[in-house]
Image (cartoon, rainbow, N blue to C red):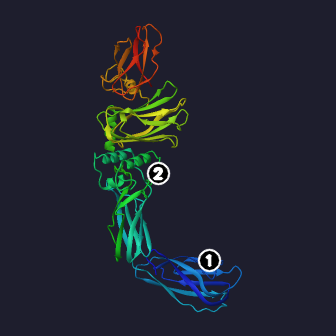
Amino acid sequence: AGGRNDVVEIPVTLANVNGLVSAAFTVTFDASVLRPVGAVRGNLTPGWSLAANPDLAGELRVTMASPGGAVAGAGSLATLQFEVIGEPGVNSTLQLSAVALNDGTIPVETGDGSVAVNVVYDISGRVTYWYGDRPVPGVSLTLRGDRTFAGTSSADGAFRVIGADAGDYVLGLAKSDEANGIGALDASLVLRHDAGLMLLSGGAAVAADVNRSGAVTAMDAFYILQKAVDLIGLPFPGAGRVWDFDPASRGIDQLVGDLTGQDFTAILIGDVTGNWGAEPDPVRALALAEERSQGNFLSLRRQELPDGAARWWVVADLGQDDLYALDLILTPSGGGSLEEVQTRVADGAASFSLASNAAGAGSLRVAMASAVPVHGFVPLLRIELPVGEEVQFGLASFQANEGQVALSADLGGLRLDQDRDGDGLSDWSEVLAGTDALSGESRLRMLGVELLTDGRKRVRWSSIPGRSYHVQFKHSLADGDWSGLDESIPAAGETTSAEDPAASGQRFYRVVLQE
């Protein structure tokens, strides 16, 4: 017996045979119930040659011959294979004819067999994504009971598991591919949830707990950033799977008929925003293009350092848009290696977590995320190159908040040459100084020179915490080079001072940022 679409195997057995070296026989059957597939040798005939002709209408002809020795005893001469194509509940008689053992020299009595088509059932449903109800294809479904049956969801998310006998089953799912859509914005949502700034629930919360600890924490954000730049693969550590499903499985008690509506919700672990499978919105794309023309940009510019090293800056002008996450792919040119390249968040992005990967195929991947957004004119990233490294970078691709914030690319950093706050310093100079390029009050300037009672002088200037400065002097403005006080002076606050130990003589002072 077998269910529809099953392949059944029917043994042709012999008993009390002696000296057998060849055999031939024909099996007739109901062609509306069975379709012949072929035949294989039985346990009596290992090593024998076998030929089967399944192309005869309602018949299967089999011929066999020994390569040398004769066989004797009882067992299987051959096993016939048929696909069940009949309707449930019907059967087909299998009748042996034209049987010839050793060309008819061994007499034989034959007996008929039969195959019944079991009454079987189908189980169907649909797999859709947790956000946007998008269909999820390629999900493997397995129906386990006394026997196991399988199916796969199609392009519209629909699936059908066919040919199951009556009984109790569990229907489970699995998928490990098509894991696109995990980026820095997902990490930002996790950080915001962990900080209590927002509450993730439903599919977003399931996707956010990537290590399956039972809670959404900053550790999940760390893993998501690592995945965003391909420092780790999937599944996430502790997850054990790439996709989750709701429900995880369905128990089916006493299957006695076709079962429909067995739907599942799919969740890609790590895709907290739910952008998996989302098609680009042409209206939104046009709006983004219009917004880009209004001035917001992402600049990439190189700074040469005095010691022969170099630093690349990534600077954004976000306008009023809040930036929570940035995904970047930078492509190097001009030779050199990325092995010793180091990436660091810039002052304007101090609240951001950062992951980078320079081990990819000719690219530097960067992902940044924060629970607290930044806006306006913001230095975001510093890329440190060692002495003598001549790598030039280009922007291969970038997404701010998964494309929700519109930015145009300023590859040469030329837009940083403007002075938008009118303080006499270019925006680029203010990036290097750490001052606010949009505020004329924020700039590096001398605050005064104080003459102390013992004749020493104290120089005061505005400063940026964390930056270091050199105080330089001349005895006359007509002198040539400036001389410097010995040490570099780190700033701890918005005002910094240094004392000149020289107790006599006129001096002119200036303060220089240590790059």
Q: 117 or 486, which is in the foreground?
A: 486
Q: Does residue 473 appear in the picture of this structure? A: yes
Image quadrant where residue 336 sits: top right
Residue plotted at (33% across, 67% down):
262
Precedes in sequence: disc 2 or disc 1: 1
Q: Which residue sits furthest right?
A: 68
Image: 503 above or below 214: above
Give how far across and how far down residue 201 sits, in percent.
Answer: 29, 54
Q: CA distance from mark 2 to mark 1?
A: 50 Å
For the residue carrying disc 2, how many other residues have a C-alpha within 10 Å: few (<14), some (14-19), or many (20+)? Answer: few
Q: 493 or 157, which is in the foreground?
A: 493
Of the 4 image quadrants, the one containing the C terminus is top left
Image quadrant where residue 462 sits: top left
Give how far across and how far down residue 348 sits, in percent.
Answer: 36, 33
The mark lying in front, picked from 2 and 1, is 2
Say which element carries label 2: loop
Say which element carries label 1: strand
Q: In the rendering, which numbered label is found on residue 51?
A: 1
Q: Which residue is mark 2?
A: 233
Would residue 287 be found to the left or right of residue 89 on screen?
Answer: left
Image quadrant where residue 268 sits: bottom left
Amino acid on which disc 2 is placed = Gly
